[in-house]
Amino acid sequence: MHLLVDAGARALAEDAGPSELALRVTGHLACELTAIVPVSERFSSWEHVNIQRGVDAYLAARQEDAQWFGPSGAGHHPHEDLLSMIGTPSHFGPGRIISRFPIRFGPGGNNQGGTASYGTAAIGPDQNTEVVTLGLVATTAPDGDPVVIGIRDESRFGPPAVSLEILAAGREAATATRDEIDRLMRVHDVFRGQVLSFTASEHHGNELVTFLPRPQIAARDVVLPDGLLETIERHIIAIAEWSRELLSAGQHLKRGLLLHGPPGTGKTHTVRYLTGRLAGTTIILLTGGSIRFIDQAAALARRLQPSMVVLEDVDLVAVDRDFTPDGNPLLFSLLEAMDGIGADADVTFVLTTNRADILETALADRPGRVDLAVEIPRPDLHCRERLLQVYARDLSVDADFARVAGDTDGITASFIKEMIRRTVLVSLRSGESPPVLRDPYFAEVLAEMNSERHALTRSLLGVGTDRQEEAGSGPAQHPRPRPIRRLAPG
């Protein structure tokens, strides 16, 4: 039976002859289908937009009226490349060409047929562009020989990946075309200068890289002990500003910053400030489970330098190996990624942690991994008053902030922010609109937040969770959150 089916298929193929798609490709390349040489390159799906930009730039440089075309709407097999699709006889479906609007590059244009499948891809936090998901375009190689460029999105049928495929009568022309598109992809890289985040998706084929808006935070809104922010800026920003001179003096550019301290003290806020200050620098944010993409993030950072890789809550990964029986694979990946960046690369690693006491010592043992460790402590009296002023800037105030600050020892910036919010709610419930921050309202809120039933809330806001101070080094302890002082009604 199988022999009969195979014989029938061969007979149909012989009778069908080449498809319209095959005739169009071979006609442009001026060679038989069997003589076509394919050169392909496979990329992660999040590079799809850069492939499109590279191909667009390649076509535009030739001032051609490029028109995309491709097979009819029938699907293709997961591992079927463009050359295999082109070679499918017309009786089997994919070779038929159906007209669709063309995409033109350069002046002028014509409407001589053409079809391709299209989709969209992000080019910014709130911007998208059209990309070819399955299609071909006829053009020439850098030396003038005819070539056909193809883009094929494999995500629909397999792992999230996109292929760039070049068809030519000779390998040299195909390879030269591929290399030039690769170069143009880097020149027109959509990720350069953006704020990016690597995230995993449960949906098959979804992209891993997302764009984030660049925060704009004024220095006056970063409330740290005197001189601390300036120290951080000198290590991160000043090196970037003097990178050329430092290299000329034989100094390395790669640097590492560790921000450590109790939860809620402003580590993430400080990172957001740096992100806004480093306009034009590519920022790659990894947090939680996304730290497993450190290899991809490091490669992207090296490619898009100047860049900064932020690893938040790195203690979740970089726990000292003494506490894990079989070592920590993610830790090894992190260390290798940090070591793999060349010393002359303008790449910054910023790590944040609540548990510096159990952090892997290897992170600090070698310069270039971590060159500066800065503790972000709980705010002192002066900082607490400044924080109250920052978070209440746009609100009406009828309270003595100096007194409130003096009676809230041991709290964090996160605690103050939440305290302000709850005080606003008390004012609104009292019938005041717009709300007014008053001393009695602060007293009511603090009494509630200081109660026993809110012990866990205080802990989550960073109050009484300095484990290194209370429990010493070693495995995590769970101390009882210490209460804050009550504020007497004024």
Image (cartoon, rainbow, N blue to C red):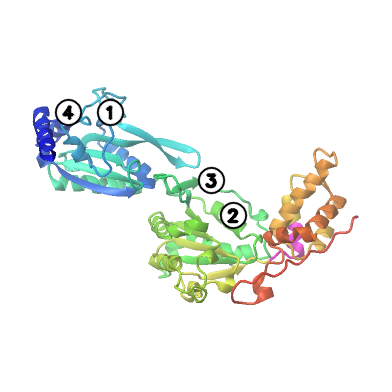
Q: Are marks 4 and 1 in contact (CB under 8 Å)?
A: no
Q: Which residue is mark 1?
A: 115
Horizontal and vertical percent for residue 217? 62, 51
Lower sequence index among marks 4 and 1: 4
Lower sequence index among marks 2 and 1: 1
Magenta-highlighted residues: 378-386
- Asked whether residue 149 is in view, the answer is yes
Q: Are marks 1 and 3 in contact (CB under 8 Å)?
A: no
Q: Residue flagged by tag 1: what amino acid is it? A: Thr
Q: Residue flagged by tag 2: what amino acid is it? A: Tyr
Horizontal and vertical percent for residue 285? 50, 55
Horizontal and vertical percent for residue 256? 50, 66
Magenta stretch contains residue 380: yes
Q: Residue flagged by tag 3: what amino acid is it? A: Pro
Q: Furthest residue to the front? A: 1
Q: CA distance from mark 2 to mark 4?
A: 62 Å
- What's the residue at 12%, 44% (across, down)? 170
Horizontal and vertical percent for residue 101? 31, 25
User: Counting other residues with Cα less than 10 Å from the Cα at mark 1, is it few (<14), some (14-19), or many (20 or more)?
Assistant: many
Q: Which residue is mark 3?
A: 213
Q: CA distance from mark 1 to mark 3?
A: 35 Å
Q: Nearer the viewer, residue 276 or 325?
A: 325
Q: Nearer the viewer, mark 2 or mark 4?
A: 4
Q: Nearer the viewer, mark 1 or mark 3?
A: 1
